[in-house]
């Protein structure tokens, strides 16, 4: 199973911006045309780590 392309830093920031303006995960997903699970993951990571930067992936060969 392959990985999809990472979201741009701008798009991740837009997700957080919408979240800060009290948009629901469903609304953000619809507005930006990205899956709800992705939106939820971005928000959760931002709350826990304070960043939206992409973390390095493990290389399995």
Image (cartoon, grey):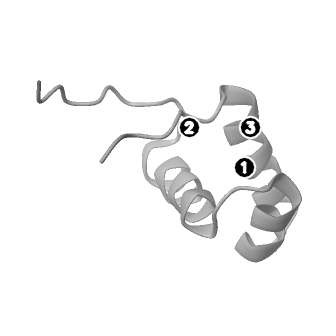
Q: CA distance from mark 3 to mark 1?
A: 9 Å
Picture quarter containing residue 35? bottom right
SS label for mark 1: helix
Q: CA distance from mark 1 to mark 2?
A: 9 Å
Find disc 2 in the rendering and name its residue: 52
SS label for mark 2: loop
Q: Residue, x 54% and y 48% (percent of image)?
A: 46
Tell which tag, 3 or 1, sits nearer the viewer: 3
Find disc 3 in the rendering and name its residue: 11
Q: Residue, x 28% and y 30% (percent of image)?
A: 57
Find disc 1 in the rendering and name its residue: 16
Task: Please provide percent x and percent y for residue 29.
Answer: 75, 64
Which sits earlier in the primary sequence, circle 3 or circle 1? Answer: 3
Tell which tag, 2 or 3, sits nearer the viewer: 3
Mark 3 Cα-neighbour bin, 10 Å: few <14, some 14–19, many ≥20? some
Please tell me whether residue 36 is drawn above or below residue 44 in the rendered image: below
Q: Is residue 32 left or right of residue 61?
A: right
Mark 2 Cα-neighbour bin, 10 Å: few <14, some 14–19, many ≥20? many
Q: Are marks 1 and 2 in contact (CB under 8 Å)?
A: yes
């Amino acid at each position: 199973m392959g990985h999809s392309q990472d979201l741009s830093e701008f798009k991740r920031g837009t997700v957080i911006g919408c979240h800060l303006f009290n948009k629901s995960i469903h609304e953000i997903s619809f507005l930006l045309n990205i899956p709800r699970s992705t939106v939820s993951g971005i928000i959760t990571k931002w709350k826990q780590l304070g960043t939206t930067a992409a973390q390095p992936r493990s290389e399995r060969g």
